Amino acid sequence: MNRLSAVLLALPIAAWAWDGEDRYGPGVHADRYGRAFQYETADGQPVPGAVKVEPDGYGPGVGKDQYGRPVRARGLDGRLLEPLSVPDDER
C-alpha cells in the first residue's frame, strides 16, 4: 500500500475517533460514552468554546489548547474525567 492510500484510509478513522466536539453547545463536549464535559486549565479556569483543543495533545487525558496550555476534561458534575475510564453504569 502506498503512502497516499494509507493517509486516505486514516482520515475517516481520525474524524470518527473524535466526533464529540461541541456536542452539547459551544465549549461543552461529549466523550465516547456521551458524558458531557468541559476543558479546564491547570488553575481551574474553563476553556472557552472558541478556543481549539487538541485532545491528548500532551498524552492520555491531557489535552493542549491553541495557546499551548495543558487542559483536562472535567464532567459537568465536577468530576475529573480520567482517560480510558468507563462510566459506572457501563460496568
Image: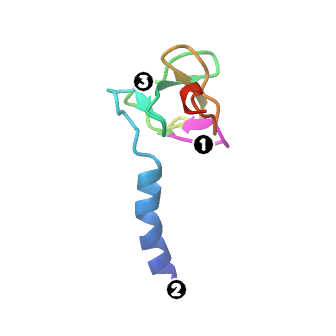
Q: Nearer the viewer, residue 18 or 86?
A: 86
Disc 3 crowd, CA 10 A, few/some/many (<14, 14-19, 20+): few
Alpha carbon distance from label 1 to label 3:
18 Å
Mark pair 3, 2: CA separation: 41 Å
Magenta stretch: helix, strand or loop mostly: loop
Q: Earlier in the sequence, mark 1 or mark 2?
A: 2
Residue projecting furthest to the bottom: 1
Distance between the Cα atoms at labels 1 and 2? Answer: 28 Å
Is 62 in the magenta?
yes
Give the image quarter of residue 13.
Answer: bottom left
Which residue matches tag 1? 56
On the image, the x and y values in percent for residue 44 come to 59, 15
Q: Amino acid at mark 1?
A: Asp
- The residue beneath circle 3 is 48
Decide which of tag 3 and tag 2 comes sooner along the chain.
2
Of the residues under marks 1 and 3, which one precedes in the sequence?
3
Image position, residue 83 (x, y; %)? 64, 36
From the image, state whether disc 3 or disc 2 is nearer to you.
2
- The residue at which mark 2 appears reads as 1
SS class, disc 1: loop
Q: Residue at x 51, y 80 (%)?
A: 3
Q: Find residue 69 and report its image quarter.
A: top right
Question: Seen in the image, is 84 located left or right of residue 49?
Answer: right
The residue depicted at 63 percent of the width and 39 percent of the height is: 84
Mark 2: amino acid: Met
Amino acid type, mark 3: Pro
Magenta segment: 54-64
Badge nearest the viewer, 1 or 3: 1
